[in-house]
Image (cartoon, rainbow, N blue to C red):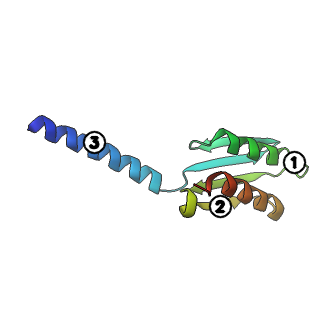
């Protein structure tokens, strides 16, 4: 009985920690600059990263950050330091790749 209770407590603690980690702040941050997209935080799906790299290599060579948390209907997205055109492209890319789940 004590071993079962210990296992239940450990599993609950791990799940609680993962839930808190996913709920607090941005789940991913990608920095755009000098023609590259660098992942600063989180796991970014490879197709999404490739699309952001294409944006970073575009003629306007945007510099700034794209960060988001959640997915699907709960997706929250913020851009910083990007001109309006590049920010809109970044929003479109992230919404296309993550907003449909």
Residue under the image location 17 percent in, 39 percent down: 6
Which mark is in front, 2 or 3?
3
Which quadrant holds residue 75?
bottom right
Q: Which residue is mark 2?
A: 78
Mark 3: secondary structure: helix
Relative placement, left or right, of 47 versus 26 is right
Position of residue 34 measured from the top left corner of the image (x, y, whole percent): 82, 42
Give the Cα distance between marks 1 and 2: 20 Å
* Quadrant of the image containing the C terminus: bottom right
The one nearer the camera, 67 or 52, is: 52
Classify mark 3: residues with Cα within 10 Å, few (<14), some (14-19) or many (20+).
few
Relative placement, left or right, of 26 versus 9 is right
Q: Which residue is mark 1?
A: 58
The one nearer the camera, 14 or 73, is: 73
Mark 2: secondary structure: strand
Work out whether mark 2 precedes mark 3 in sequence or the reverse, and give the earlier one: 3
Give the Cα distance between marks 3 and 1: 46 Å
Q: Are marks 3 and 1 in contact (CB under 8 Å)?
A: no
Q: Which residue is mark 3?
A: 11
Classify mark 2: residues with Cα within 10 Å, few (<14), some (14-19) or many (20+).
some
Which quadrant holds residue 40?
top right
Residue under the image location 8 percent in, 38 percent down: 1
Work out whether mark 1 precedes mark 2 in sequence or the reverse, and give the earlier one: 1
Work out whether mark 3 precedes mark 1 in sequence or the reverse, and give the earlier one: 3
Position of residue 39 measured from the top left corner of the image (x, y, whole percent): 65, 41
Residue under the image location 46 percent in, 51 percent down: 22
Mark 1: secondary structure: loop
């Amino acid at each position: 009985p004590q071993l079962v209770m210990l296992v239940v407590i450990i599993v609950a603690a791990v799940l609680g920690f993962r839930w808190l980690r996913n709920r607090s702040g941005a789940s991913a941050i990608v920095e755009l600059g000098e023609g590259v997209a660098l992942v600063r935080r989180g796991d970014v799906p490879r197709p999404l990263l490739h699309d952001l790299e294409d944006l970073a290599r575009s003629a306007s060579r945007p510099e700034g950050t794209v960060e988001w948390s959640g997915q699907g209907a709960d997706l929250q997205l913020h851009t910083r330091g990007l001109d309006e055109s590049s920010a809109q492209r970044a929003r479109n890319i992230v919404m296309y790749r993550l907003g449909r789940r």
